[in-house]
Amino acid sequence: MSHFQNTPKLNILVLCTGNSCRSIMAEALINHLGGDQFNAFSAGSKPSGRVHPTSLKTLKSQGIKTQGYRSKSWDEFADQKIDIVITVCGNAAAETCPLYIASNGQQPLKTHWGVEDPDGQDDAEFLRVFKILEKRINTLVNRNSELPITQQFLNEIGNIT
């Protein structure tokens, strides 16, 4: 089933448990690479309350702005239209998410783009995780925009390493 085609900018919510590493990097990447197509946000089911400094260091080293990113709860988005929900950690994927409504009045598309947690690892691991997310997000951003974004397409992106 196709979900969105020829719509204004879509809202993407990237979820992870702590909202400090992977989800923050994915939010920043989507806004940086696809800001003309998407508004990206990130949140956590149990937010840590801080953005991991190495996540910000990694983003900055790749030429991506780091201002304004913060660890926040997924509850902050309860009243916002969310078109696509992407989980980037296994815990968040297994949790029951709040009910979001897409801009077309339907349920948002939900997909899992799991990637290892770099927390506690060295800078090279943060960069490795960043590069995986970057490949996936580039695939989303550089798709044929004449075709609708489908559940299958989003799920296939999650297999890119």
Image (tube, helix red, strand yellow):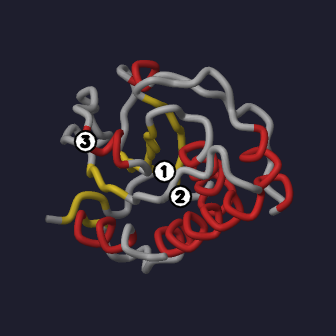
Q: Are marks 3 and 2 in contact (CB under 8 Å)?
A: no
Task: Name which residue type carries label 2.
Answer: Gln
Give the residue pinned by disc 2: 37
Q: Position of residue 77 (x, y in %)?
A: 42, 25
How many numbered marks, from 0 up? 3
Q: Earlier in the sequence, mark 3 or mark 1?
A: 1
Position of 14 with respect to 98 (left or right) is right
**Residue 63 lies in what quarter of the image?**
bottom right
Q: Position of residue 80 (x, y in %)?
A: 40, 27
Q: Is residue 29 left or right of residue 161?
A: right
Residue closer to the observer: 118 or 114 = 118
- Name the spot of residue 128 as percent of width and height, x first: 65, 67
Marks 1/2: CA–CA distance: 5 Å
Q: In the rendered view of the protein, which quadrant contains the N terminus?
A: bottom left
Precedes in sequence: disc 3 or disc 2:
2
Which one is nearer the viewer's eye here, 26 or 41?
26
SS at mark 2?
loop
Residue 136 vertical placement versus 55 (above, below)? below
Q: Earlier in the sequence, mark 1 or mark 2?
A: 1
Q: Please give the name of the residue rendered at 85% of the width and 59% of the height, measured from the top-left corner.
A: 61
Q: Amino acid at mark 1?
A: Lys
Residue placed under numbered mark 1 in the picture: 9
**Circles 3 and 1: CB atoms closer than 8 Å:** no
- Relative placement, left or right, of 24 versus 101 is right
Task: Name the mark nearer the viewer: 3 or 1.
Answer: 3
Q: Residue at x 40, y 19 (%)?
A: 75
Tag 1 and tag 2, C-beta contact below 8 Å: yes
Q: Amino acid at mark 3?
A: Ala
Residue at mark 3:
94
